[in-house]
Amino acid sequence: MARGFTYADGASEDVELAQRQDLGRSQIQALAAGKNALVREHIARRTDLPLGTMVALAHDKNVDVRAAMAGNESATASILEHLAGDRHVAVLHALLDNPVLDHAIAERLAFHRKDEVRARAVRRLDAALEAPDHGRDHGVPELRERVTYADVVHLYEEPPARPVRTAPVRGYRPAEEA
């Protein structure tokens, strides 16, 4: 293979295999560990990645693979935190375009040393201020459609205040009632 040679889309059977939705976990891990960077990039875009594969792809030597992982909406917060320290602008741009990026990471990138990253982070933060907060539930997305909100209803009244009972004082006799 010639130095600098990259695969074109469709030039490898593995590229087509990586785009299939019905891959098993072992196939995903095998393709993510392959030599073809285009295959690893396609795998990094998948939403059904195991955590170990996400970690491996977040540390990949190819910038496009890391950028694909940064744009993956199913990436965990620790993966996105790691990718926020990447020095390549393409990775940071993909990270800032990811809708599940934590607000704190976007704020940290607003003080990045590169102007284009700072500008994009500020635009993201401004857009977040204008958009309504829907309270995304990252933990259990299957239940999001079943959530309902109700007004607070007090089911009982506050009990009346009880009198304070004090200890008797030596030599004190209460007045007898007549």
Image (cartoon, grey):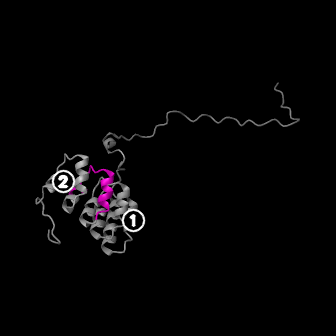
Instruction: Name the residue located 12 percent from the left edge and 61 percent from the top edge.
Output: 9
Image location of residue 62, percent across then percent down: 25, 66
Q: Which of marks 2 and 1 is in front?
A: 2
Mark 1, secondary structure of its residue: helix
Instruction: Classify 20 as above or below 150.
Output: below
Instruction: Mark 1: give few (<14), some (14-19) or many (20+) Cα within 10 Å.
Output: some
Residue 160 at x, y percent in the picture: 62, 34
Which quarter of the figure has residue 88? bottom left
Please tell me whether residue 46 belongs to the stretch shown in magenta: yes
Q: Is residue 85 above or below residue 50?
A: below
Residue underneath mark 2: 18
Q: Where is residue 120 in the image (x, y as percent from the top left)?
A: 30, 68
Q: Give the range drawn in magenta.
A: 42-60
Give the farthest residue toward the left: 11
Q: Earlier in the sequence, mark 2 or mark 1?
A: 2
The 10 Å Cα crowd at callout 2, few under 14, some 14 to 19, many 20 or more, is: many
* Quarter occupied by the N terminus: bottom left
* Residue 74 coordinates in the image, percent (x, y): 30, 52
Residue bearing the label numbered 1: 107
